[in-house]
Structures are given as structure tokens and as C-alpha cells.
């Protein structure tokens, strides 16, 4: 591996220091490193424009939201994400900040288990025209604005109509995302 991008969540107090430590660690091993300061609060309203291509792997410093952001850009390119947890939940950001060095050495030596996740590709079509499209590792939520208003949705999977729904919204979830809604459900909720 020759090139790494560190996506550092600017709202996490340990991210800047840890990013520098990881930078030094990787550069000492001949890996070129660049850092992107990710502002998770802005990403709610604005999708940051970041090109992940050309990187052999991406390190995230933050929580699950930072991992999900990186996965949107890395998944279509087949770039692995090395998730260091500086957040609260850590379901996806599974590497602790205290054990990152050992885990990174295992990863660079090819000794780490790499988990491949399913993605959901969501497209909103209105009057025959695509008005929104996204890829997600957790889920896609389609709702009215405000969320208390009903919407009429025709939901299809692989172009097969699942039916019309009159609802406040709908959540289409991957197996990864479904665990956040209901571990007892045993799979994705559609």
C-alpha cells in the first residue's frame, strides 16, 4: 500500500492529535498520507465533494457517521476503510484509539479480517425524472417535509413494484443498518 487518506472528524477532540500520530506512523513505512478535515455537522445539509480515488485505503477518525461518509466515496472504488472510533457508539468504527497501532500493523501485513458490507442504491423518480439518488451502507429514508405530512409512494425493488404506500415516510435498510432499528427483526426492514 502506497497511499492513504485520513478522514478526520473536526468535532472530535482527539482527531487532530491522533491524525498526526497516524501520519507519522504511515509515512515512516513509506506510505504517502493526506488528511481531509470532515465537518460532520455541515454534511447534514451539504454533501462534501471529496475524491477518494487514488488511495489504497482510508482511515477514519470519528464515529460511525464518519465511517458512513467515507464508505459512500470508497465503496464504488473498492477502497477499504480502517475505522478508528472517537465517537460514542462505535458499531462501525470498531478500532479503539488505544489499539489502533496494533490493528494497523495487522491490516498493513494483510492479517486483518476485512468485512464486506451490502449497500442500498436509492433513486427517487418523480414524473419519470430522477430527482435524487444515493448509495448507502445503512439506510435510505424518504419522507415528506415536514415529516408529519403523508406522502404517496410507489416502492419498487429491481424495477418490480412492491406496492403503493400512503405514509409519513419509508426506510429502506441494509443488514448493517437494520441493527440500529431492531436487532430482533433479524434482517433488513423494508
Image (cartoon, rainbow, N blue to C red):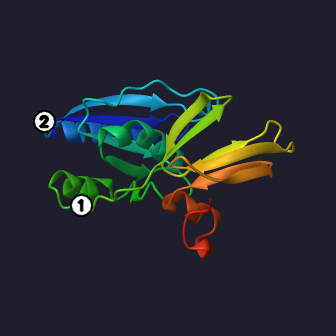
Residue 128 visible in the displayed image: yes
Indicate which disc residue 29 carries. Answer: none
Residue shown at 61% from the left, 75% from the top? 184
- Quarter in which the N terminus is drawn: top left
Q: Which of marks 2 and 1 is in front?
A: 1
The quarter of the picture where residue 131 lies is: top right
Q: Estimate the x, y position of residue 177 in percent, counting from the top left.
A: 55, 57
Q: From the viewer's perspective, is residue 137 above or below residue 33?
A: below
Q: From the viewer's perspective, is residue 52 above or below residue 111?
A: above
Going from N to C along the chain, the mark reached first, 2 or 1, is 2
Label 2: which residue? Answer: 30
Q: Estimate the x, y position of residue 183 in percent, counting from the top left.
A: 59, 71
Residue shown at 34% from the left, 43% from the top? 59
* Residue closest to the eye, 18 or 181: 181
SS class, disc 1: loop
SS class, disc 2: loop
Label 1: which residue? Answer: 112
Q: How far apart are marks 2 and 1 (CA)?
A: 20 Å
Residue 16 visible in the displayed image: no
- Quarter in which the C terminus is drawn: bottom right
* Residue closest to the eye, 133 or 126: 126
Q: From the viewer's perspective, is residue 91 above or below residue 40?
A: below
Amino acid at each position: 500500500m502506497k497511499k492513504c487518506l485520513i478522514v478526520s472528524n473536526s468535532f472530535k477532540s482527539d482527531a487532530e492529535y491522533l491524525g498526526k500520530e497516524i501520519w507519522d506512523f504511515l509515512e515512516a513505512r513509506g506510505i504517502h498520507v493526506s488528511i481531509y478535515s470532515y465537518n460532520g455537522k455541515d454534511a447534514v445539509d451539504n454533501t462534501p465533494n471529496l475524491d477518494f480515488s487514488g488511495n489504497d485505503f482510508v482511515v477514519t477518525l470519528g464515529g460511525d457517521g464518519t465511517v458512513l461518509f467515507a464508505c459512500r466515496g470508497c465503496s464504488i472504488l473498492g477502497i477499504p476503510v480502517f475505522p478508528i472510533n472517537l465517537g460514542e457508539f462505535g458499531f462501525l468504527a470498531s478500532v479503539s484509539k488505544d489499539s489502533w497501532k496494533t490493528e494497523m500493523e495487522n491490516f498493513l501485513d494483510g492479517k486483518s479480517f476485512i468485512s464486506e458490507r451490502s449497500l442500498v442504491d436509492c433513486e427517487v423518480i418523480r414524473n419519470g425524472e430522477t430527482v435524487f439518488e444515493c448509495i448507502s451502507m445503512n439506510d435510505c429514508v424518504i419522507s415528506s417535509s415536514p415529516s408529519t405530512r403523508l406522502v404517496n409512494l410507489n416502492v419498487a425493488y429491481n424495477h418490480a413494484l412492491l406496492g403503493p404506500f400512503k405514509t409519513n415516510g419509508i426506510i429502506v435498510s441494509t443488514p448493517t443498518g437494520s441493527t440500529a432499528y431492531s436487532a430482533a427483526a433479524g434482517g433488513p426492514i423494508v
